[in-house]
Amino acid sequence: MKIDIITLFPNMYTGFLSESIIGRAIKENKVEINLVNLRDFTKEKHGHVDDTPFGGGCGMVLLCQPVFDCIRSLRTEDSLVIMMTPQGEVYSQKKAKELSLKNHLIILCGHYEGFDERIRSIVDLEISIGDYVLTGGEIPSMAIVDSIVRLIDGVIEDDSHEYDSHTNWMLEHPQYTKPRVYEGLEVPEVLCNGNHKEIEKYKLKESLRRTYLRRPDLLEKHELTKEEEKYLKEIIEEEKC
């Protein structure tokens, strides 16, 4: 996979692209990530990439010319152009999986007051990472890239993300490691007895419990299986106690 990130602040990505799983994926040629400085494409004097908005208002708006020229220089038949904007589709694990299967992503980071509206005519997808506003699209773009790269084949083991929260619509079940008892807090017996059938049952039920308690809205959007319905009834009764 190839990812081009269009930004006014490429130095923000220094640590992000060199550390941890992202850095390793780049070194192992699992993904190619390029930073493209939007200022390199402006034809305005003094390197300006923005101007005041028609009709008045606060802030500055990114110009069409540098953005159009930059995207056109990068775009191929396989490209998907993504605009980072708080007005976009709210990001999800499902969308991360879809994007991880693409060959080439071009991610456009906004800044200042926003984009000239006409820029939307040359993008394929608008994404928001939540109902709040940041100073620019750089941090959201890092979140998007991180969520995508970890799903690329060979970057991490499949089992490592099989039970991630939201992967199977539910939140992830509780996790434990050594020691078995710490300051009087014990690991559930079922996880230590080697009975894989019981362990899988525990994981499913506790994922349901955590979803029921923390994100009941997810339950409302999902049609439960008979097994899930059975466990949910048990959970509701248990939580009443």
Image (tube, helix red, strand yellow):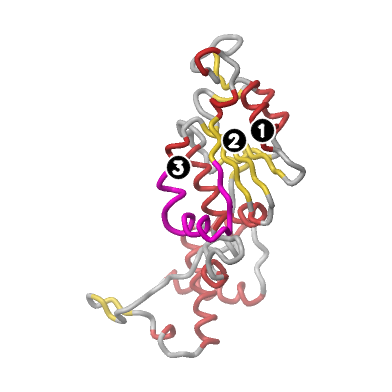
Query: Tag 2: residue type?
Result: Leu
Residue on which the image places disc 3:
13
Q: Nearer the viewer, residue 70 or 91?
A: 70
Residue pictured at 54% horizontal, 54% vertical: 147
For the C terminus, the quadrant is: bottom left
| Quarter of the rendering containing residue 41 | top right
Residue pictured at 64% horizontal, 30% vertical: 70
Q: Nearer the viewer, residue 58 or 156?
A: 156
Residue on which the image places disc 1:
71
**Badge nearest the viewer, 1 or 2:** 1
The answer to whether mark 1 and mark 2 are in CB contact below 8 A is: yes
Q: Earlier in the sequence, mark 1 or mark 3?
A: 3
Determine crowd level at label 1: few under 14, some 14-19, many 20+ residues with C-alpha closer than 10 A. Answer: many
Image height of 138 relative to 205, above or below: above
Residue pictured at 53% horizontal, 32% vertical: 37
Q: Secondary structure at mark 1?
A: helix
Query: Tag 1: residue type?
Result: Ile
What is the span of residues highlighted in magenta in the rendered image? 14-34
- Residue 232 in percent (x, y) is at 56, 71
Q: Earlier in the sequence, mark 2 or mark 3?
A: 3
Q: Secondary structure at mark 3?
A: helix
The answer to whether mark 2 and mark 3 are in CB contact below 8 A is: no
Residue on which the image places disc 2:
108
Q: Earlier in the sequence, mark 1 or mark 2?
A: 1
